[in-house]
Image (cartoon, rainbow, N blue to C red):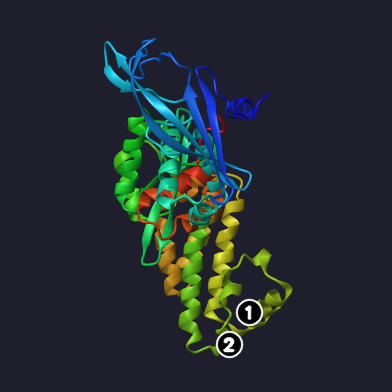
Amino acid sequence: MSTKELFSIALGLEEPWFVKDLNFDPEKRRLDIVLDFTKGSKFSCPECGVQNCQIHDTKERTWRHLDFFQHQAFLTARVPRVNCTTCGVKQIQVPWARKNTGFTLLFEIMILNFAQFMAVEPLSVMVKVHMDSLWRILSHYVEQAHSTIDLSQMANIGIDEFSKKSGHHYITVFGDLDESRVVYISDGRKSDAIHQFADFLEQKGINTSQIKEACTDMWPAYLKGLQERFPQTTLVFDRYHVMTMINQAVDLVRRNESKEQKVLKHTRYIWLKNQIHLTRKQMEEVATLSKLDLKTFRAYRIKEALRQLWACKNKNEAELYLKKWYFWATHSRLSPIIEFAKTVKEHWSGILNYFHSRITNGIIEGINSKIKTAMKRAYGFKTFAYLRTIVYLVAGKLALPTRY
């Protein structure tokens, strides 16, 4: 077997294509593989598919291919334009590359695989290709795969926001809680984000009434959008956000009290941690501080009592428990705790709806690290589209090509 025949087989070439020549330059660390087609070949029209069209002319094109060991490899070929009696003169589609790109399909698939595990900037350096070109590759395949995702069985969604940079700039992430995947991302966290998601579903032929439950926080903009576009969807307020809010209330009590009680300095995290996660030293510190009749300790006890709500066996039991907790909290004479309790009262049903389905944004939180990693990979780039592309790539469970 000749070297040219070997490379033809390795490249998966089929008639009428073959390797015409090989040019290796060790100084430039470059391998050029020249392809050609058999003389007298005819091709199908790329528009209508009619076969045996005569060649009108050819234009030489070059594509970046997978590296040959430590050397860059390029494919060069004369690409025919054919005369179609119906469509006129059209350039054929070569089997090893997409139309109007300078990369082979195998090279692009390699980029897709690497980009799932490393940032685009070092990947650009590694393959010696400008970042803009890599983003175009990623965007094409990710958008194509995302446009074909099957949402026909999606019933439970989680909605969460993530800060994409300092200065209160957020993205809103919509997750399929049953499939543990991100299905949509919107720039910002206003009610428009909900409307955009509803529009996306409708474009895919999904009626918003298909969404049975939505797990979210108590952000008013989200609630407004959900009421307008998902009126039949049951709202479930995420328990992790509920506990985050009472932690903020406890910390506010501590900060106010620490102005007079210096003993509270540098104790912030022991009041915010789950009691079962305290270290032995922290437990001893809490026990010592509990003897000082501190407002912060009272707030801490109320917070830990609320944590026990989630252990209730059913909705009726939970509602009885929450009523007792609410009475305690509203009579605590701790303003931040009272304000939080009023918030609980305003969102009473959504909190108790957890005990019907027991869905949480734990799934979304579970892929939180992936999303934050994706944000770091897209950091400093020009558009929200880059960030969206990377998030879908790493957390969307898309059906991406692995071969051609």
Q: Position of residue 295 (x, y in %)?
A: 52, 79
Of tags 2 and 1, which is closer to the observer? Answer: 2
- In this rendering, would 95 be left or right of 225? right
Quadrant location, the N terminus: top right
Where, quadrant-wise, is the C terminus in this rendering? top right
Residue 16, position as x, y percentages in the image: 50, 17
Numbered label attached to residue 182:
none
Give me the C-alpha separation between circle 2 and circle 1: 12 Å
Closer to us: 198 or 142: 142
Q: Where is residue 139 drawn, in percent x and y?
A: 41, 42
Please name the residue shown 40% across and 37% down the image: 101
Q: Which residue is at 56% across, 81% downward? A: 294
Q: Which residue is mark 2?
A: 263
- Mark 1, secondary structure of its residue: helix
| Percent coordinates x, y for residue 267 in the rendering | 58, 79
> The disc labelled 1 sits on which kind of residue?
Ser
Q: Which residue was labeled with disc 1?
A: 290
Q: How many marks?
A: 2
Q: Secondary structure at mark 2?
A: helix
Can I make out residue 236 in this image?
A: no
Mark 2 and mark 1 lie on one chain; the one further toward the N terminus is 2
